[in-house]
């Protein structure tokens, strides 16, 4: 049976917590001081330690450093002296949860049930980390660079706990994937993970159109996780409510009066510097400290080395599998992948690979397909063409691609091609097979879609949605 140690100088609190713990299938040891707690810990290592923050001979959180196997013991602080500073300090010291007296029985039960799974889950994560790292991936995240190995270490440490996680990183670095990974490697994985902003729900009749009670996501995700993206963009009045539910584990529906208990884990994310957001008045300082229990910085793609190539090949293989093709990157294309800065990070890379795939020719038997190269730092047009393509066809493709690149502005296209405007019009008439109306400079706008345009450029490599 799992074993619980309850430490509190209030006998009534110990009696109540012991009753709840035994109902959940725990054996229980009791202590009223740090000295008594140390004696009990020497007799048997607890699977869960519920301790008051203030004890007659010291701070209960001191016991964290004296646990024989910290990874195998879940530490829960239960206190009647709740402050943001004490909550943050407790969680950073190693506590996995923080309950305010009088704690809701449902929340205590949820904490105890999760504690039973700690050892098995941490062993599972350790095995997963060792095996999958050899393949260059962890959970839903792909990459084997040193920067990513640091990230995997952080995720594997925090996932089994109930600690709040703050993911910080540029747009496109994979914050949502990291949030999914934390949830899926946690004890809450069998409960929902909701990625929404409608948090607290409302009562029937609380406002015009509220014709029924609606349960918000804190209620529906009870026992699970909520991912709050771009936390610095949350309205201030909502930040106040969020802070309250983080501190007390309860909330009130809009239009309601009764308190609703909710046991959820918060995984928040931002692409801003959260300290600057506090200074700018975008994020409450007390909420920041409550969220910043376990901050994780996601590295930008430009700092991930060989992961750029691994990700590009992975995205290309996705396209090949979906379409039944076997397109590949040329060596020059792979080189140019490393030359680009990738301001849109992994999202931009995925979009680029999808676009390059569409623009590249299919493989022809006996020939080597030259695929689209990656964007370069200089403004450059790249057209991919099979070796042996007739010169007339090469001229047509280059002309049409350049016209599309210039947004159908023929004068600019003619300048880039090094021909006169009249020559360009003559070519377009030939390609179209009929006379054109030369007075209408947009008369050939539709011609851009007349043939496959195998083109990419790097003035805006994320233009397709990155």
Image: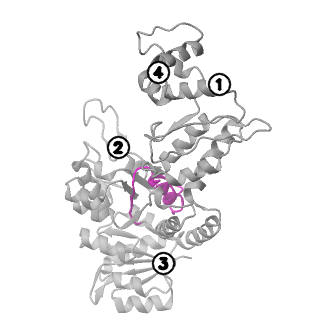
Q: Secondary structure beneath disc 1?
A: helix
Using the image, tell me which numbered label, if any, was put on residue 144: none
Task: Give left or right: position of 72 versus 228.
Answer: right
Give the percent coordinates (x, y) of residue 211: 32, 31
Query: Number of marks in the image?
Result: 4
Tell me: residue 68, above or below residue 108. below
Q: Secondary structure beneath disc 2?
A: loop
Colour setting: one colour
| Towards the viewer: 227 or 136 | 136
Residue of label 2: 198
**Is mark 4 in CB contact (under 8 Å) with mark 2?**
no
Mark 3, Cα crowd under 10 Å, few <14 / some 14-19 / many 20+, is many
Give the percent coordinates (x, y) of residue 200: 32, 47
Q: Secondary structure beneath disc 4?
A: loop
Tell me: residue 89, above or below residue 403. below
Asked if residue 452 shows in the view, the reply is no
What is the spatial separation of the Cα atoms under label 4 and label 1, in whole angstroms? 20 Å
Residue of label 1: 393
Asked if residue 431 shows in the view, the reply is yes
Residue of label 3: 73
Q: Which residues are magenta?
A: 163-190
Residue of label 4: 420
Residue 188 colored in magenta in the image: yes
Task: Indicate which label's residue lies in the foreground, 3 or 4.
Answer: 4
What is the spatial separation of the Cα atoms under label 1 and label 3, in whole angstroms? 71 Å
Q: Quadrant of the C terminus?
A: top left
Q: Closer to the N terminus: mark 3 or mark 4? A: 3
Task: Indicate which label's residue lies in the foreground, 4 or 1.
Answer: 4
């Amino acid at each position: 049976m799992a074993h619980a140690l309850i430490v509190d100088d209030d006998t009534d609190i110990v009696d109540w917590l012991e009753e709840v713990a035994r109902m959940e299938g725990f054996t229980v040891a009791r202590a009223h001081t740090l000295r008594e707690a140390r004696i009990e810990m020497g007799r048997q290592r607890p699977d869960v330690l519920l301790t008051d923050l203030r004890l007659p001979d010291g701070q209960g959180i001191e016991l964290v450093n004296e646990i024989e196997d910290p990874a195998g013991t879940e530490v829960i602080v239960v206190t009647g002296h709740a402050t943001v500073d004490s909550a943050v300090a407790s969680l950073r010291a190693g506590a996995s949860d923080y309950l305010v007296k009088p704690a809701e029985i449902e929340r205590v039960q949820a904490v105890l049930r999760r504690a039973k799974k700690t050892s098995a889950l941490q062993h599972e994560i350790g095995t997963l980390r060792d095996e999958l790292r050899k393949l260059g991936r962890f959970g839903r995240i792909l990459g084997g660079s040193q920067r990513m190995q640091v990230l995997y270490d952080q995720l594997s440490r925090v996932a089994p706990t109930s600690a709040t996680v703050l993911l910080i990183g540029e747009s496109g670095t994979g914050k949502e994937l990291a949030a999914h990974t934390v949830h899926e490697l946690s004890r809450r994985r069998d409960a929902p993970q909701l990625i929404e902003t409608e948090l607290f729900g409302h009562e029937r009749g609380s406002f015009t159109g509220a014709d029924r009670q609606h349960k918000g996501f804190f209620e529906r995700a009870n026992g699970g996780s909520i991912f709050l993206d771009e936390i610095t963009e949350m309205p201030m009045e909502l930040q106040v409510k969020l802070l309250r539910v983080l501190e007390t584990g309860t909330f009130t529906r809009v239009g309601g009066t009764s308190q609703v208990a909710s046991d959820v884990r918060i995984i928040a994310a931002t692409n801003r510097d959260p300290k600057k957001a506090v200074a700018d008045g975008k994020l409450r300082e007390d909420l920041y400290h409550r969220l910043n229990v376990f901050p994780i910085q996601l590295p930008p793609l430009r700092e991930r080395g060989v992961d750029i190539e691994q990700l590009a090949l992975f995205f290309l293989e996705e396209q090949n599998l979906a379409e039944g093709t076997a397109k590949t990157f040329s060596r020059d294309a792979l080189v140019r992948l490393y030359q680009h800065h990738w301001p849109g990070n992994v999202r931009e890379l995925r979009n680029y690979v999808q676009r390059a795939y569409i623009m590249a020719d299919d493989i022809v038997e006996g020939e080597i397909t030259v695929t689209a190269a990656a964007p370069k730092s200089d403004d450059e047009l790249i057209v991919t063409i099979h070796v042996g393509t007739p010169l007339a066809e090469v001229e047509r493709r280059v002309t049409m691609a350049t016209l599309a690149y210039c947004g159908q502005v023929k004068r600019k296209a003619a300048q880039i091609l090094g021909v006169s405007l009249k020559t360009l019009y003559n070519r377009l008439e030939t390609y179209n097979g009929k006379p054109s109306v030369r007075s209408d400079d947009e008369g050939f706008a539709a011609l851009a879609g007349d043939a496959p345009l195998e083109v990419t450029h790097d003035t805006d490599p994320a233009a397709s949605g990155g």
